[in-house]
Image (cartoon, rainbow, N blue to C red):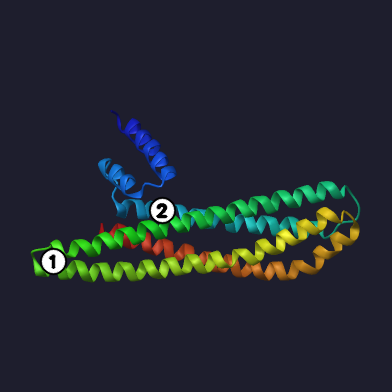
Amino acid sequence: MHMKQKLTYALLITLTLALSGCQSTYYKTMESFGYHKRDILVSNVEKARESQEEASEQFKSALEKFSALTGFHGGDLQDIYERLNDEFERSEAAAKDVTNRIDAVEQVGNDLFGEWKDELSKYSNTKLRNESRIKLSKTKSKFTRLLSAMRRAEKKIKPVLDAFRDQVLYLKHNLNAQAITSLQSEINSLEADIGRLIKDMQKSIDEADAFIKELKKNS
């Protein structure tokens, strides 16, 4: 079987096992293709980083659309509502992807460190066991910092989504100029919330880059 076919096969199995929720079988199957928990963790962190980058861009895009529409001076209010609702739905989907990616990072990380700790007792060489224990402690500490940064950024998403949702719902049931005016009073607050969100996401992205670099260096 060619490498490309093997990778395709592995991806199909991975998807099937992920959907079935059979984590131990998933790990065993991935190991048979040469992908161990450390490799899976690196991949998951990379995907979480990418999802945060995409979410940051989406929230900035949504804010720009909301801001632009506060200058409403006539037009199709139904069309305005639909455009804002599309932006909200894209933002909501981006937020869900961020959460799912972080959850995946947390699960594999916990499984990796649990396995690493259990296998310390298998060493017969005391020096190697102590070196591995020290490396485990340092790596786990960096992982904890990474996960905290990711969760901190994730928590900033909800107030932004709530504000977007409120405005879209209000506009849906009040298709008039007054509803557009209500958007204007929220823009400054939204700008501040999104600014904080993007700042925390960038910190999380930086932590992800550092963690990936560290894992690859020690692999």
219 left or right of 129 in image? right
Amino acid found under the numbered disc labelled 1: Leu
| 74 lies above or below 113 | above
Q: Residues within 10 Å of mark 1 (few under 14, many from 20)?
A: few
Q: Are marks 1 and 2 in contact (CB under 8 Å)?
A: no
| 208 lies above or below 138 | above
Residue at point 30%, 29% (across, down):
2
Point out which mark residue 44 bears: 2
Which of 125/115 is in front? 115
The residue sitting at the left extreme is 124
Point out which mark residue 128 bears: 1
Quarter of the figure that contains the N terminus: top left
* Residue 99 rendering spot, x and y as whole percentages: 52, 57
Circle 2: element type: helix
Point out which mark residue 112 bears: none
Q: CA distance from mark 1 to mark 2?
A: 28 Å
Residue at point 87%, 47% (across, down):
76
Quarter of the figure that contains the C terminus: bottom left
Amino acid found under the numbered disc labelled 2: Asn
Residue at point 35%, 61% (across, down):
110
Q: Earlier in the sequence, mark 1 or mark 2?
A: 2
